[in-house]
Amino acid sequence: MRYSSLVDRIGGRAVTAWGIHYEAVAAARAGEDVIVLSVGDPDFPTPEPIVEAAVTALRGGDTHYTPLAGYPELRLAIAAAHQESWGQPVGLENVMFTAGTQNALASVAQLVLESGDEVIIPEPMYLTYEASMGLSGAIPVPVPQPASLGLRLDLAALAAAITPRTRAIFFATPNNPTGIVMSRDELSEMARLAIAHDLWVVADEVYAPLTFDVPHLSIAALPGMAERTVTIGSVSKSHAMAGWRAGWAVGPAELITHMTNLNQCTMYGLPGFVQAGTLVAIEQRHAIHESMRSIYRRRRDMMLARLADVPGLKCLTPQAGMFMLVDVTGTGLTPAEFVPRLYRAVGVSVLNAGAFGPSAKDFIRVSFANSDERLAEACDRIARFVG
Ligand SMILES: Cc1ncc(COP(=O)(O)O)c(C=O)c1O
């Protein structure tokens, strides 16, 4: 049978980069002794009060259709948290509850981009961005964050990438896979260009609560940016709730109305019990963020210490999140060779970071969303393999 051209636009790198990962997950399920460090799904359970709230809602009969944009009390809580954390004044009308950051990203892409529009995206970029742009037929224009600049945004290249067809800048801070937090200077330059060229800015801030050393800044709070910025986030990473599919978009009220209309033909609302759990997640965010941050910081430091002396490996210290980039070229292997050989030799799955963009071509991405013991064991195995 014949398919639409959409199937090609959503079937790129994001689909093919996960080969070893899927193999490792299947092997782990089959009881084999493999360590999966190729994904950012927190290894521990969602905090108990959140689970309790969802179960109570379910038992209390919250099994019906829900308002398309999300329960008002949840949207208000998200608005208050956004304002408190990032300093942008927003209300209920600026918030849409979504099925995770991914759903927000794809929805916004469809609402602000036309086929043939150009979208600037700093690379390395999260793997689903390209296909998400493909939904609308927009063309991703990667802008390097080169290793020579410490994987930070090349501001001259950013300015040079803008053409009359540029419609938006999509980016993540903190970044996946680099773990780098954008600086005020970088964000200010991006804001200046967005205002000068009348561009949308979509800021993926899913890792914002998990910064270790430097504070996260929201571009939406910079002068002149509220009307053109959509901030997206979720509780997937910050609250160990990846499977709940609970996130949000915060942006101009008109965009939220359009998102609500889109939701009517895609989701028709999201589960009430998920929203009940998410409300508790937002209410208890201070304590939960602190605890998650300290776990990931401890793991990051432990892995940096254990891999520091392995000859041929060079770790890039992440400022946030749950991933670390490691330059493996000193081993004499490219990442494309290193990843499958590591897995076959010692059963540790990591990703070839080159899949996130050419600037990361020398690196593998290692997740620390696994227990301290397994991470320590994985480091030993990586050292053994390299040795
Ligand atoms: C940068 C980035 N954006 C979005 C997502 C998707 O997150 P969510 O579970 O909220 O859809 C991820 C997940 O790894 C990510 O790394």
Image: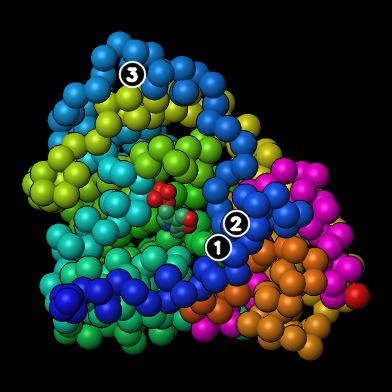
Residue 97: horizontal and vertical position, in percent? 26, 38
When asked about the image quadrant of residue 128, the answer is bottom left
Instruction: Answer yes or no: disc 2 within 8 Å of ligand 1.
Output: no
Q: Is residue 160 above or below residue 79?
A: below
Residue 354: horizontal and vertical position, in percent? 55, 79
Q: Quadrant of the C terminus?
A: bottom right
Residue picked out by circle 2: 25
Q: Nearer the viewer, residue 225 or 21?
A: 21
Residue picked out by circle 3: 58
Q: What secondary structure is marked by label 1?
A: helix
Q: Quadrant of the N terminus?
A: bottom left
The label nearer to you, 3 versus 2, is: 2
Image quadrant of ligand 1? bottom left
CA separation, marks 3 and 2?
Answer: 30 Å
Horizontal arrangement in the rendering, residue 54 relative to residue 146 (left or right): left
Q: Is residue 80 visible?
A: no
Residue 66: horizontal and vertical position, in percent? 18, 28
Instruction: Give the extent of the magenta segment.
Output: 358-386
Q: Residue at x 56, y 53 (%)?
A: 40
Mark 2 residue type: Val
Q: Residue at x 49, y 50 (%)?
A: 207
Lower sequence index among marks 1 and 3: 1
When asked about the image quadrant of residue 378, the answer is bottom right
Residue picked out by circle 1: 22
